[in-house]
Structure formats: structure tokens, C-alpha cells
Amino acid sequence: MNPLVKLSLPVFVFINALAYSQDYVNPNSASNAGGLNSGVDYFNKKDYKNAMLQLEPLANTGDVEAEDYLGRCYYEVKSYNKALKWFEKAANKNNPDAQFNLGCFYEAGFGVKMDLPRAVLYYRQAAEQGNMYAQYNLGLCFDYGNGVDADSYMAVAWYKKAAEQGYILAARTLGEYYMNGNNDVKRDSEESVKWYRIGAEKGDMESEFYLAVAYDLGDGVKQNNNEAISWYEKAALQGDTGSAYNIGCIYLLGSAEIRDTQKAIQWFQKAADKGWPDAEYNLGVAYANGAGVERDSAKALNWFGRAARHGSSDAQYNLATAYYLGQGLKKDLKEAFYWYKEAAEQGDTDAAFDLGGCYAKGEGTSVNVDKAYDWYQVAANLGMPDAECAVADCFINGTGVYKNTPEGFRWYKKAADQNDAEGEAGVAYCYLQGLGVVKDEKEAFTWYQKAAEQGNAEGECGLGYCYWYGTGVDKNILLSKSWYEKAAALGNKDAKDALQNLIK
């Protein structure tokens, strides 16, 4: 269960919408009392036809504000060539909004061939006059090297100018910038929190979320569950589902004085009702374990099913296992195979291993030893000891891959080095038989002993063999019988057969 999720932050994207300074009317314009204000009023009401009727006569007299707004009207009706014409007229008279809008046109290729250097030129003209949108976009140009050499320091400088004028997106971008850092700008979580706080205190949902994350993790600010919950709640009230989920995680996993399973369930429910997969999965776990709610296997499987369909690999694995074992659901190996595959393709290690088992045994699908090996290998590469042993078996036996006993030994040893009993027994067998390694009966005995001490049946059976034949240890019939009996009690067939021979 992932206790923290992050939203994708919509930054580092050029603003292609135009700058609408709707209250900007030059008090020195002789036309203020007439058509300009009327035209702006129509524009704000999205009545572009009547707005153009009011603005065009004024624009034709050279009124810069009318030229700018007329360009906006033509932009809204997607007449980009005409919009470009009027923006150029206003921009040539040093109107910063028109200069910014021209920058957007050249950046996006509206009514003109895309020209990033020229976009930068217009953004800079507007930015130097204090247009915060242009300052932000100029920052982006320096950030990504669009139309200008990339320069992180210049990017940050322009972002700050925009943020200091109250542009929330710029403040949020600075928060992200300092939170991550790069080769030029050092990561500074305290500076990041400073900028996120500016946005959060102005009600920006994403800033509220990331400020909450900072308090949640104690990154850039002293860790404080209550502060984290407070800011998550503000974001959640604006509809942020990830914040609702994270509140649930704090109540579930936070400090002892704040833990409250029932409150956790309530917040998971809020997030789950909006289709948040991890919240749905956690509700499934809650109903499966009776944590904060009455145990209910049917409800658990329902939530696992919902989470699985929404892409939760944990839920997909649990659902697959339920179908495989017939727990709470009718046993269905085809459904089990389907959900194991869904989870495995998302990188779930257990699912990859079990999917390999399905291919190896033909459960829910046709037997395919090549694919079995492939999926065992996926899980083994993720460090799963059971899978490492399965890969070793494939190499030792030449199943789904060319026989290669040294490689088989290597994979058994990888599992054994993780204190895995099956891997230890495999290493012992290789030493006993000389498979992929020089035969060494003492080493075989040592590794069988390691496995047996963990209660592994193969290890116990191996010790029975060693003591019976005096392999790597002094012969001892009583100890041999004792270890064979332990292995037989665990269902080991070789141990049972050995005991039958002892009786004879």
C-alpha cells in the first residue's frame, strides 16, 4: 500500500490562452466614455460580434486598447490572421498585452509560421514592461531552451518576477523547481515550501497539496501531521482526490497520537467514491481484515475488483489469487491468469512469478515453458528469491531456456545469499552433484544444514542422505532417520521413500 501519492502538476507548459486584462482601460484614451468600454463589456460577455462592431471603428483610428481587444475578439472566433494583424499594430505601440499575445502566436503557430526566437522577442518586450504572463513564459523559454539558450538561472529569475506579482502558476512552478533541483539550481526544500505556501494561502489547490506533502514528509518544514491534514483538507474541499487519500493514509499510518482507523476509512471512502484505485484497494484490505469496519469478504472482493479495473496492481494480484484459490469467488483459473497478467505487466513481482507458474503448469492458459521462464526471469530480476530459484531450475533442467548449469548455480546462490531456504537447498544439490560448480560434499552438507535449520523439507531430506551415506559428514544412521522423518512429515516424497527402504 502506497502511503503517499503525488498529483501531476500542470506546469512547464506554455500558456497559449491570451492575456485578458479585462479591467485595463487607459484613462487617458479619448474613447473611454464610448465604444471602448462598450466593446470590452461585450467581449467579457463573450458577445464577440457586437464587441467587434464597437471596437473596429476605434481600432481604425489607432486606439491601442481597441486594437488589442479587437485582436482578442478575432482570436476567439479563430480568425488568427486578423488577430495577428491587430496584435501587431498594438504591439508596435508598445502595448505589453499585445506583445505577450504575439509571443503566444509565434510560439504556437497561430496564423503564422512557428518562430520560437521571435516569440521570445515579444515575451521579453512584454516581460520588461511587467506583464507577469510574459515573465512566466519567458522563464519557460529559458528553462527548456525554446528560442533561446537554456539557462536555469534566468528561468528562475523570470519565474520570480511573475510570482512576486501574484501569479500563482509561477509560484507553484518555483516550488516544484526548488523541490526537485537540477544541475544548475540546487534543491532547496525550504525555498520550495516558501513558494508553495504563497500559492496555498491564495487558495491554489495544487499548492495546498504540495504544502501538505511537505508537512507530511517533513521536507523543508518540520514534520507535522496536523498541518498536513489541514492543507490536504483544503485541497480536498476543492475536489482533489489525492489529498483525500493522503489524509486517510495519515490516519492509518501516522504518529500514534493521530492514528484513527475509522477516520482513515472515511477518507479512503471519499477518495474511492471518486475512483481513486489505491483508496479502493485499501478499503478492500479493510473489509478483508476487519480493520475499522466489520469483516466482509464480499465487500472486500468488490473493492478489490473496482481497484483492479482502475489499474491497481495490488488489487489485481489479490483478485487473481482469490480466483486462483477460489476464496470468496468461484475458482476460475482463466480469470486468475488474466489478473495475474494485468498486475505483472505493471511490474508486480509476485504476479510475475505466479504468471510464470501459470504458464509452466498450463493453469488458465496453454503450457508455455518459454513464457514461464520469461516471467520467472522478470520476478528474479526484481530480487524475488522464489523466482530466482525458479530461474535456476530452468537453467539446470533446460526448461524454456538453454541448459546452463553454472548459470543455474548462480541463481540458486543469489537466492541463498538472501537467506532463502530453497536457494540454500539448491546450492547444496549443485555441490552434491557437481552441477555448475566443482563437486564438494562438505559444502553440500553445510548448505543442506542451513536449509534444514529453516525447516526446509529438501534441506532436511538432504541431511538425511548425507548422514546415511556419510557424505560430507560422519555417517550417523540415527541422525539420518531423524532428518528423513522431519522431511517426510512435511510431505517430502524422497524422504518417505528413504524411510521405507530403511524399514526393509
Image (cartoon, rainbow, N blue to C red):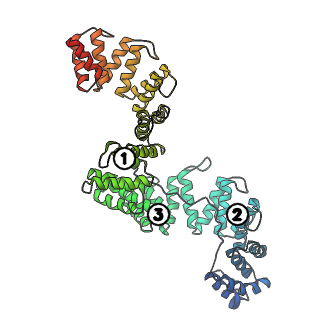
Q: Is residue 4 left or right of residue 132?
A: left
Using the numbered discs, state the Cα–Cα distance from disc 3 to disc 1 in whole angstroms: 34 Å
Secondary structure of the residue carrying tag 3 is: helix
Query: Mark 1: which amino acid?
Result: Asn
Q: Is the Cβ of the residue at disc 3 closer than 8 Å to that at disc 2?
A: no
Q: What is the CA distance from the residue labelled 3 to the residue labelled 2?
A: 31 Å
Q: Residue 76 or 35: which is nearer the viewer? A: 76
* Residue occupied by mark 1: 318
Q: Is residue 223 visible?
A: no
Residue 208: mark in rendering:
3
Residue 361, how many percent across, how many down?
A: 40, 33
Residue 314 higher or lower than 208, as above or below: above
Camera-side mark, 2 or 1: 1
**Mark 3 or mark 2, which is nearer to you?**
2
- State the separation of the CA atoms marked 2 and 1: 47 Å
- Name the image quarter holding residue 175: bottom right
Residue 102, visible in the rendered structure: yes
Q: Which residue is mark 2?
A: 108
User: Which residue is found at the position 37% from the left and 18% from the top?
Assistant: 428
Q: Earlier in the sequence, mark 3 or mark 2?
A: 2
Where does residue 502 sit, x and y in percent of width and height?
Answer: 22, 12
